[in-house]
Image (cartoon, rainbow, N blue to C red):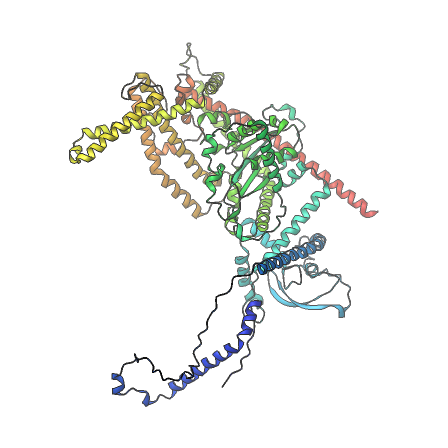
Amino acid sequence: MRYTVQVAFSGSRSHRVRQEANAVSNAAMLARHRARQRANRQENQHPAASNAPDHDEVLQPAYDHELPSEDTPDDQPEDEEDNWVTLDEEPPPNPIDEAIASRMEAHRREARLFNSSVVMRLLHPIYIALKHKTQNWAGPEAANSFVNCRCLPHTLTKRFVDLVDIIGQQRVKLPFCRCTPDAVRLLQQGYLAGSPMQPQTAFSMRLMIFHNDLWNHCHIGSMPFTLALQDWLEPRSGRLFAKNSKNPRELRKPFSSAVDMFRELNDMSHSLVMSSLQLSEQQRLACVSCPACFGPQPPNANQYPTATRDSLILCLDGNFQHRHHAKASRDEAIRSHRFFIQPNEVENMKAEIRIKEMENKPPAQADRCADAHKAADDKRNESTWKGCDDTGLMGCCCRHDSVVYVANIYKSGEQRSLPCALIKKVLTAIEPNRQVGILYDIGCSLNKFIAIRDLFGPDRSRIKFATSIFHAYVHNWLCQLEYNPRYNVGWGLSDGEGLERMWSYLSPLVSPLRYATRNHRLAAISHRLKYHNFRGHNQLALWLKRKFTNAVNRRRDTRTILAGLLNLPNRHEHNRSSFTTKYFMRQWNNQREFQANHTEEENDRKARLVKLYKEEAVLELLRNRLMGPEVFLATEQQVSELLDTIAKKTESLKKEAEDLHRSNSTAEGTQRSDEERLLLLLWDAKSELFVHAVHLHAEEQPIVNSRTIGERLGTKLKEKIFKAIQTRRPAINKSIDNFNQCYKNFAAKFPDQELSDFKGDLTYEVFADLPLDDKFWNDGLYFHSKAPWAIDPDVRAGINCMLILSRIQEEFQLIAQELARAVGWAIAHYNHLANFIDYLSDQCER
C-alpha cells in the first residue's frame, strides 16, 4: 500500500529543488515508517503467547554464524526497509560557474546599492520637511499621516506590512501607488522602511530616535535590541508571525537596514547644511570638532607671549584594537565618512615621503624611542594582523578631546605616513601662520623623521613636537628634557592623552565591528565620534571651568612649596643667602646646557657600565659560593663547571672593562670608580622604580578621572583596577628594597653626599603617593655631576616648582584664548545663520 504525501517545499532554492527531486522516495520512506509504528502498536495492544521462546529456542545461538548457501536465489527480494543511499563524491566546481555566480552576486549587490541610493535621494527632502513639521516626531502632529497621493483607488495596490513601534506592533494591509515610492509613503506615515524596495517591515521614527540615543550612551547590538523589543511588545500587542509559520518574525536584518538608513539621512542633512552655508574647512572644524580650537582669532592675540599666541595643540595616537577581518565582508567600494580622511591622501603622503628620501637620501639610523614603541614597528604586529584588512585607526584630536580627523589603517602598522597625512590635512585647514603643537607617543622620533626628510616645506617652522605626558616619562631623561611638555614652554598643562580617553569611549565597538562589513564599521565609528564631539560641545564651558579651577588649585599648592624653599639658606653661595627664583631658573638652564653636551655614545657607555657592575656582583656571588661549606656537597664535575664559568665570565668582564676605558682588573678601582659604580647602580634602581611608578599611575588613572572629570566606573571595573594594583605590589616592593639597599651602600661609602629625601627608608605607601613630576624622579645623579641641580634635592624641588608655575601661567593664557575663540565662533556662526535665513526668506518671497 502506498501513501501519497503532499510535501510543502520551503527554504532556499537549492533546498526546494532537492526536496522536489526526492519527493517520491521520501514519501515511500514515510509510509514504511508509519506502517512499522502501526505494527508496533498492534503488538503492544494484543501480546501473543506464542511469541515467548521455547526452551529449545533459548539454547539455540542468537546469531547464525554460517554463511548463506550458494543455491540461494539471487532474485530474492531485499528488505523493503533497507534505505541505504550511495553518496557520490561531488565533482570539483567549474571555475566558469564560479565566475558566473560571483558576477551575479556582484550585480545583485550593485543593484541593491543603486536602489538604496535612489530611495535615499527621494527620502531625504521628505525627511527634512517632516522633521520640521513634527518637531522631530515629538510634537502633536507626529501621529498624523502626511500622504498626499492623488491616485485613483483602483490603481492602488495593497500589501501587508509589519509596523513596529515602541508601544506596539501590528500587521496592516497598506495601500501603495506608483507615484510615490513605498519607502517614501511609509515615511509620510511616520515609519522608516526596513528595505528600499517593496518593504515588508517598517519601524516608527520615534523608535529609531530612541534606539539612536540608547546606542550613543550604551552600545547595544541589533539582535539583543530586537529580541528585547519583541519580549516587550508581544504581551501588549500580539506576535508577528513569520510567513507560513507560528514562529515570531526575525527583525534583526530589517531593523539593521533601517538603522543604516536613519544614520545616512542624518548625515545627508548635515552635509546639506554645511554645503549650503558655504563654510571654509576651518569653519567646518569649528562646527563639528571644537570651536575653542578652530574659532576665529581673538582680537587681542598680540597681547599674549609668542610661545602661546594662537597656538593649536593637537594629539596623535594609533589604535590597533579596531581591526577588521578580511573575510567578514565582500569587495565593496569604501564610501567616505565624516572625520575620516580619504585613503588617497595617505597614499599621496607615502609618495611624497619616497620622493623626499630619494632627494635627500637620509642615513639609516636606529631610533631607540621608536624601537621601544612596539606599535611603530610593523614586524611586531604581523601575527596580530593575520587575516585582517583594516588593522586599526590613527586619530587626531585637540586638547579638549574633540576628534579632528581619523585615518583608517589598511594592512600596515603605525607608519609615519599616517600622522604626516593628518598633520598635512590640519595645516591646510587652519590659518597659514598659526603655530601647531603635536603631542605624540613618539613625537621625538617623528620630529627627527620629518626634519631629516625636509617634509612640509615652509610649514615646518610652525610645527613643534612633544611626547604625551604618560609616554614621556617612559623615554630616557635626555629625551624628556627636550620633548616632555612639562619641561618645555608653550604646552601649558596639556597631557596629550585625549585619544586614550577616546579609544576607551570606542572600546564597546571593537568586538561587534570586527566581523561587520567595512563600510558598516567605518559608519558606526563615525556615528559614535559624531556624538562624542556633540557631547564635547555641550560640555566645553564646563571643561574650561574645570581646567581653570585645577590650574588655580595647583598654583596655590606649588606656591606654598616654593615659599618654603625660598626661606631656606643657599649653601651653594658664599654669602649663604636664601634661595631665589632666578637662582632656580639659572640652575635649570645649566642642567639643560649640561645635557646638550652629552652624546648618545656616552649614554651607551653608562648603560653598559650598569650591566657590567651587575655582572660583577653576580661573579662575586659565585666566588662566595666556592668559599661556603656547600661546595663540599657538590660533585667534582659541578665544581669544575662552576670554576670554568667564573673564569670565562671574568675574562669577558675584563675585555668589556677595557672597552669602557677602565682598568684591566675588574676587582681594583679607585675611589672615583667606586663612586661612579654606586651612583650608576643607584640610578638603575631608581629607573626601575620609575617604570613601576608610571605603570601604577596608569592603572589608577581611570579612578582619578572618575573623581575629576566625572567618568563613571562600574563596580567590576573598579575591582579589576584594584586587583591589578595589588598584583603589581610584590614587584614594586622588591624594587623598593633594591633601591634602599643601593642607597645604603652609597651612603656607607660616601656619607657626606646627600642624593635623595629618602635615605634608604622608602616605603610602598610613600612611593604610591609620589607624583610623576616629583623632585625625587630627577635624574641629576645619572650625569655624575657635582652641580647643585644634580646633588641638592632642594634645588631640584625649586626647579620643579618654577617649571610647574610656568606651565600653569601658559595654561591660563591658552584657556583665555580658547574661550575668546569659542565665544567669537558662537557670535559669528549665529550671525551667519541669521543672514542665511533672511536670504532664504527673500528667495521664497520672490
Q: Residue furthest right?
A: 846
* Residue 207 appears anywhere in the view: no
**Residue 729: x %, y % from top left:** 35, 38
Say left or right for 24 vs 110: left
Residue 675 drawn above or below residue 78: above
Of residues 845 and 11, the one drawn nearer to the viewer in this rendering = 11
Question: Residue 353's x, y, as percent?
Answer: 58, 33
Q: Residue at x 47, y 30 (%)?
A: 366
Name which residue lies at 68% across and 28% down. Answer: 299
Q: Residue sitting at 47 percent across and 45 percent down? A: 384
Q: Nearer the viewer, residue 73 or 58?
A: 73
Q: Please tell me in which quadrant of the rendered image residue 648 appears.
A: top left
Quarter of the rendering containing residue 208: bottom right
Toward the top, the furthest residue is 575
Q: Nearer the viewer, residue 148 or 237?
A: 148
For this view, does 12 lie left or right of residue 566? right
Q: How many marks?
A: 0
Q: Is residue 384 visible to the viewer in this orientation of the structure? A: yes
Q: Nearer the viewer, residue 809 or 417?
A: 417
* Residue 775 image offset from top left, x and y in percent: 42, 25
Q: Position of residue 525 (x, y in %)?
A: 57, 47
Tell me if residue 182 comes above or below residue 828 in the rendering.
Answer: below
